[in-house]
Amino acid sequence: MKKLSSIVLVFIFSIINLYSDDQFHSKYKDWEVKFYPKMKVLKTITHGQVVWGNEFGFVKNQTNCSTEYIWFSISSYEKDIDDVKDKELLLNFNIDSKEYKLKAKVSFINELTPIMKIVTFTRIEPKEKFIELLKKNKSIKIELLGPAELVKKFDIPYESFSLDGFIENYTKFNESCKDLSQLNIPVKK
């Protein structure tokens, strides 16, 4: 059952990139929360500090507010980037010099322009300890570590993200899953 819901979520997440129909949107500092009504999906993200189009955050389906996944997308200009589709890469999450290494499978690859593609990892369930560490820090760096033959397919195999506004937007992300009207309420500063 868990495998089936992962497959369904990957399908939903791939559709998100094709149809950005977010009618509800909230932004505070470097983070934002979006709701995609056709898929009933919420996403809270921040943009990369190296490449603005790269994203880090979390997604969940409104029909199951208790399950969320890390969302990490990174771009590449390399012509053979499609070779990483469905492959597993070792990622390093560095938060305040604490490193968390884990393997993650590429969920999908979308063409942004004829020469640039976006590679997205989504099937990563965060641990509470990870979330708490994000809440206590100012930035996170994510690096692709291996295998080397796959990492070389990324022109910039790392990204840094600000955590300024994370606590407020993560809270709104969770509250909005149960009550979408929360997206219309300004963040309490």
Image (spheres, rainbow, N blue to C red):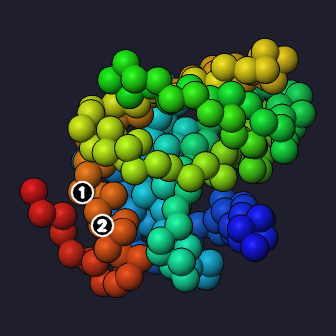
Question: Are circles 2 and 1 on residues that touch, CB within 8 Å?
Answer: yes
Residue type, mark 2 in image = Lys
Q: Position of residue 78 (x, y in %)?
A: 80, 25
Q: Position of residue 106 (x, y in %)?
A: 75, 43
Hey, what amino acid is under mark 1?
Answer: Glu
Q: Please give the residue where the numbered disc 1 appears in the rendered image.
A: 168
Quarter occupied by the N terminus: bottom right
Few, some or many C-alpha atoms within 10 Å of disc 2 (few <14, some 14-19, many ≥20)? many
Q: Which x, y percent locates residue 180?
A: 37, 82
> Looking at this view, is 175 or 78 the one in front?
175
Q: Would residue 15 appear left or right of 141 to someone viewing this image? A: right
109 versus 100 height, above or below: below
Q: Viewer-proximal residue, 116 or 127?
A: 127
Task: Name the residue: 89% across, 33% down.
Answer: 83
Q: Secondary structure at mark 1?
A: helix
- Residue position for label 2: 172
Which residue: 18% across, 64% down? 187
**Residue at mark 2 to residue at mark 1: CA–CA distance:** 6 Å
* Residue 30 visible in image: no
Where does the image place residue 139, in percent across and percent down from the top left? Answer: 34, 31
Instruction: Please name the residue shown 30% across and 58% down the image.
Output: 169
Position of residue 140 relative to residue 55, above or below, is: above
Query: Could you tell me how many numbered marks the image carries?
Result: 2
Q: Is residue 188 left or right of residue 139?
A: left
Q: Is residue 50 left or right of residue 184?
A: right
**Label 2 secondary element:** helix
